Amino acid sequence: MTLIVIRPEPGASSTAALARARGLAVAAFPLSEARRVDWEVPDPAQFDALLVGSGNVFRLGGAWMEAFRSLPVHAVGRTTAEAARAAGFRVDVVGEGGLQSILDAPAGQGMRYLRLGGAERVAVTPAPGTVIEARTVYEIAHHAMPQPLADSLRAGKALVLLHSAGAARHFAAECDRLGIDRALVRLACLGPRIAEAAGEGWAAVASAPQPDDAALLALAAELV
């Protein structure tokens, strides 16, 4: 059984490297890429911190970053925190279990957040007194499934890793477009919301207990 990674770069190579370190057979076929978009940049003085759910926010860069480096980052997880630090930002909070975990923690109470992310965002519920203003700073562009990946799926010996709901929907649509039988494909998802987005009819669908690569690859190791 081969693990198939379809997330955008550089995440695809990072996940593949972690999988190989575990002794797992893996192949990367990024089916999407993150692209910077223009956005209206507000006054940094209006906010206490940046709330960020993806390292793409920092990897794609932009002129806005210089003005906002004075604000601390509250990052969804370790990978996003590392991207923030590499871009010269201070990280005050690293979440465990998604952005909601940050908002539920004492450090997230009563904050004025500027939430930066992609066009597709996970819904969150701030505590009373917490204000969140969101901006879209990148979008995900999807690509057609390459023939080698389609052939691997049709062979029925692949476990596909899904890192986002958007990726799950696109992967399912590509399988249907190419006439790939879902019953031949097994899925390991970063969370239940992603599994739900993939739809039904797959050979197997499982969700990681925590939304990070370590938990996802531990799950994958049990399934292969």
Image (spheres, helix red, strand yellow):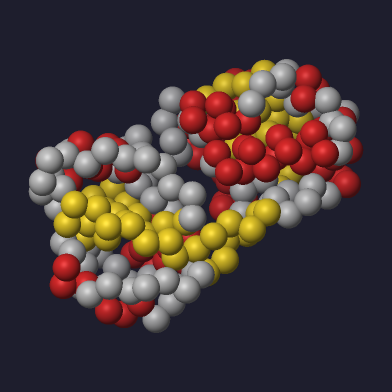
Can residue 111 be seen from the camera position used here? yes
The N terminus is located in which quarter? top right
Q: Nearer the viewer, residue 141 or 152?
A: 141
Q: Is residue 75 left or right of residue 139?
A: left
Q: Nearer the viewer, residue 217 or 84?
A: 84
Does residue 161 sit above or below 83 in this rendering? above
Q: Is residue 223 left or right of residue 37?
A: right
The C terminus is located in which quarter? top right
Q: Position of residue 161 (x, y in %)?
A: 63, 36
Residue at the (73%, 49%) spot, across then down: 29
Q: Position of residue 182 (x, y in %)?
A: 77, 25
Residue at the (27%, 57%) spot, across then down: 133
Q: Nearer the viewer, residue 87 or 31?
A: 31
Residue at the (54%, 41%) spot, across then down: 164
Q: Position of residue 23 (x, y in %)?
A: 65, 35
Residue at the (16%, 61%) spot, across then down: 48
Does residue 48 sit above or below 194 in this rendering? below
Does residue 206 sit above or below 16 in this rendering? above
Can residue 163 be seen from the camera position used here? no
